[in-house]
Image: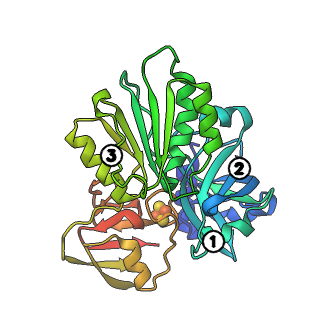
Amino acid sequence: MMFTPVLNQFSTWFLHHQSFAGYIEPIMQMFKPEWRAGQFRAQIIKATILSGEFLNVQIKPSKQWHGHIAGQHISLTVEINGRLLTRVFTVASSPQYFKKTGKLRLLIKTSNQGRFTGLLNSKFTKNVWCNISAPTGDFVFEKSSRPATFIAGGSGITPMLAMLHEQLRLTSQKTSKKISLIYYAKAAEHQCVDELSDLAAQFSHFSFLLLTRAQSSDITSNINTAEKPDIYCCGPTDFMQTLADFSNKHSLTYYQEAFGLQLSRLNDDSQFNVKLHSSTHIVSANDVLLPQFEAQNLPVKRGCGIGICHQCQCIKKSGVVRNLKTGELSDSGEQLIQLCVSQAVSDLELQL
Ligand code: FES
């Protein structure tokens, strides 16, 4: 919208809000429950408890949500006990399923100890509203004439499910290009096994292997390097590192989901002053700004913590930050930054 920047500037000057949409949020919520600036509304259709403390959740986004690419993730925000909590989940259903039904599937590993996931069972009841972000992420299937081997660890199966449903239909059964899945999980915690069996029965170029670490501790041992497959991997960080190293050693093309990865830290002991309204705070260059502000009890908001949901966004009036997701340095002027992925590289002046 042409007027949006003008309204946002007006809002910053006169309404003490970063955006006009944020200012009118409470009014919008009187008509549309859970309407939030910069997010999409979505309604819970169904939530089913699966083995291994997984929850299968079907949600229906509002019409403004335009769909995803298989393998991408979204942030999901729910209000629990008056607090907004956000986490990132990969969509476990294909774009075709969304086009046909208007719905998305999320497979969520819950935990009784989890501040967020432990509370979801009771929260996710039919017709409850939540918020989702636009889809992001570049862990998507790449066109290639080589076979593909998907390797999933635990809840890393979710992007694989979306990609398999999409790609098995697109790749012709006449082609020799095979797609295989090696799926590691704890015993009795493999998800959607019937669904995978149906796919294998329907598409002769697809096969899958269910494994536990106890059965096969070397997670690379079932990769057929003679076929030179492209490797797609999603799982815990050490799991992906092992497969990245293996692929590198065998000159295999390697793709991995990156949203669960730690942001790299610079080994820099410098300290900088951050001017915030009328007070000044010291931060280290060795960590991103959000946890440092939280430790100093400053009024910051945390959502996903990995640069997706924009809940931690604030205005940088001056100074230079590095975005640890992209590695890029900002310019020194006024701009919006995300505190959870920004590291100080000079003194800063911020407006929360
Ligand atoms: S907390 Fe989500 S972008 Fe920073």
Whether the residues at callouts 1 and 3 have beta carbons within 8 Å, the answer is: no
The CA span between labels 1 and 3 is 33 Å
> Residue 338: image x %, image y %?
42, 63
- The amino acid type, in three-letter code, at marker 2 is Gln
Q: Quadrant of residue 65?
A: top right
For label 3, the crowd category at 10 Å Cα-Cα, with few meaning under 14, some 14 to 19 and many 20 or more, is: some
Colour pattern? rainbow
Mark 1 vs mark 3, foreground winner is: 3
Tell me if residue 278 comes above or below residue 220 in the rendering: below
Q: Residue at x 69, y 76 (%)?
A: 82
Q: Tell me the residue that label 1 is attached to.
A: 118
Circle 1: residue type: Gly
Query: Disc 3 marks which amino acid?
Result: Thr
Which part of the image, by quadrant, shows the N terminus? top right
Name the residue tied to disc 3: 220
Rendering coords of residue 70 (x, y %): 53, 38
Which residue appears at 52% of the width and 29% of the height? 167
Residue in view at x 49 percent, y 75 percent: 300
Q: Residue furthest front?
A: 215
Please state if 339 lies on the left or on the right of 132 as rendered.
Answer: left
The answer as to whether callout 2 falls within 8 Å of ligand 1 is no
What element does badge 2 sit on?
strand
Distance between mark 3 and mark 2 Cα atoms: 33 Å
Q: Is residue 4 left or right of residue 82?
A: left
Marks 1/2: CA distance? 18 Å
In the rendered view, would you say 63 is above or below 323?
A: above
Mark number for residue 37?
none
